[in-house]
């Protein structure tokens, strides 16, 4: 059966509960069992690329190893968790020195060398459920809704590690939008950065970045934006100055599957 | 000047700065270009020249958003963001050089700010 180890991450427990609860209810409706590892740790939010950083990579390795021990693929939802875990898995598979240092430190029963397959929830929909199959299970299609997919940076780059889609002309979120009955809107800034954590110390820069994204989507006639990232959602909603609605893609998924209270009146 | 700094940054980043052909595409695509005193292509060039301390003292090291646009779009796979990261680490690993301290967090909070922002900022700015 389709059973995955599911890694929610820190923000899905707190400010991004919608991203989490709709991911869980939708997976269940689609016949996928998500099991959460015990005692998981925060991924750290950003991958430290430096080769002489080991401690900052360990929590991601623990998560990857818990999926390996369960004999399951790992699925993530938050873009940041996904990015950190995928980059860690890529480096531990390709950098023997890093793998050896990590394993010497962790002293696992069996060394971890990148064995776990990692899916982002969107990839699980595409590659395991199948968008055609998903489409058949939609009971409340987003008919006539023009939806702009916001990839941001974390889902796509660095593309050799993330390997989700074409990093410059991705289609996975647009295909998702089509599967739930909406009309995807392509806009120039869909894979450019929202400003991310710079909102902590330079609000003006976050405002500049996020407003550029929203203006770009608005110019192409989007009715709403979807994202997989809590920090993108925050920047696009709070820093952009735009009133274009922004939702987690899982919320639209749950709504299309008829799992949400009836408020499809955006 | 610490003569070992260049070696340290090269080793920490894993980047071969000699591959750069100075096309400037990294800086052209950088979302923080306007905010930076030194731009991604200058990081690569200045590391090659061994001018590390100037970069270490510049606010530019805190402006990188880790969006990996320069990494993915470099035609020579130089991966400038990894150089910026290594220089920033050379700075913040020094005693007393954390860029973000926990006591300053409460005034940055609002009711919607996701934990992800705080965690990520600490990872980027503090050791």
Image (cartoon, coloured by chain):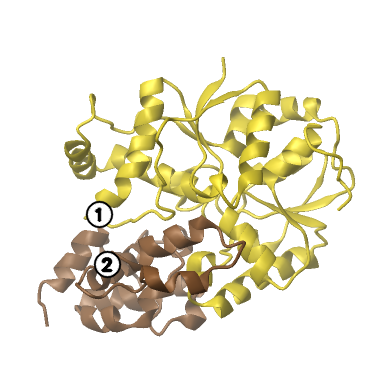
Q: Does residue A145 appear to the left or right of A17 in the view shown? A: right
Question: Dividing the picture into quarters, in which one does residue A108 lie?
Answer: top left
Q: Nearer the viewer, residue B66 or A42?
A: A42
Q: Quadrant of the N terminus of chain A?
A: top right
**Residue occupying the point 33% across, 83% down:** B58
**Residue occupying the point 55% across, 45% down:** A13
Q: Is residue A160 above or below residue A48?
A: above
Disc 1 is attached to a residue of which chain?
Answer: A
Disc 2 is attached to a residue of which chain?
Answer: B
Q: Is residue B32 above or below residue B124?
A: below
Question: Dividing the picture into quarters, in which one does residue A260 lie?
Answer: top right
Q: Is residue B30 visible?
A: no
Q: Confirm or deny contact between disc 2 and disc 1 (CB under 8 A).
A: yes
Q: Which mark is residue B89?
A: 2
Q: Is residue A116 visible?
A: yes
Q: Secondary structure at mark 2?
A: helix
Expressed as whole percent of the image width and height from the top left, the position of residue A245 reads: 77, 59
Q: Which mark is residue A53?
A: 1
Q: Does residue B89 appear to the left or right of A174 in the view shown? A: left
């Amino acid at each position: 059966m389709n059973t995955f180890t599911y890694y929610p991450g820190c923000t899905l427990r707190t400010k991004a509960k919608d991203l989490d609860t709709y991911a869980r209810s939708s997976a269940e409706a689609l016949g996928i069992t998500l099991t959460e590892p015990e005692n998981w740790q925060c991924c750290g939010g950003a991958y430290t690329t430096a080769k002489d950083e080991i401690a900052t990579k360990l929590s991601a390795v623990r998560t990857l190893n818990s999926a390996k021990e369960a004999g399951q693929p790992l699925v993530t939802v938050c873009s940041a968790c996904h990015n950190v875990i995928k980059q860690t898995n890529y480096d531990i598979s390709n950098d023997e020195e890093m793998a050896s240092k990590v394993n010497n430190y962790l002293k696992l029963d069996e060394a971890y060398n990148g064995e776990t397959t990692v899916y982002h929830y969107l990839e699980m929909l595409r590659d395991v459920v199948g968008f055609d199959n998903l489409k058949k299970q939609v009971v409340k299609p987003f008919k006539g809704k023009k939806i702009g997919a916001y990839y941001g940076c974390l889902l796509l780059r660095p593309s050799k590690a993330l390997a989700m889609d074409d990093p410059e002309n991705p289609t996975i979120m647009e295909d998702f939008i089509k599967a739930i009955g909406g009309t995807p809107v392509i806009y120039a800034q869909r894979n450019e950065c929202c400003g991310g954590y710079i909102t902590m110390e330079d609000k003006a820069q976050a405002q500049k970045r996020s407003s550029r994204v929203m203006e770009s989507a608005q110019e192409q006639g989007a009715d709403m934006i979807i994202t997989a990232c809590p920090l993108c959602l925050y920047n696009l909603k709070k820093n952009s100055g735009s009133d274009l609605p922004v939702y987690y893609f899982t919320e639209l998924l749950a709504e299309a599957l008829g799992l949400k209270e009836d408020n499809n009146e955006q | 000047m610490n003569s070992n700094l260049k070696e340290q940054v090269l080793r920490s980043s894993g980047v071969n700065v000699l591959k750069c052909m100075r096309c400037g595409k990294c800086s052209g695509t950088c979302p923080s270009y306007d905010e930076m005193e030194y731009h991604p292509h200058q990081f690569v060039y200045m590391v090659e020249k061994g001018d590390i301390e100037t970069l270490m003292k510049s606010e530019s090291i805190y402006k990188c958003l880790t969006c990996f646009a320069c990494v993915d779009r470099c035609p020579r796979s130089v991966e400038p963001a990894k150089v910026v990261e290594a220089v920033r680490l050379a700075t913040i690993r020094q005693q007393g050089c954390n860029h973000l301290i926990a006591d300053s967090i409460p005034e940055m909070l609002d009711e919607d700010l996701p934990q992800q922002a705080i965690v990520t900022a600490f990872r980027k700015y503090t050791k």
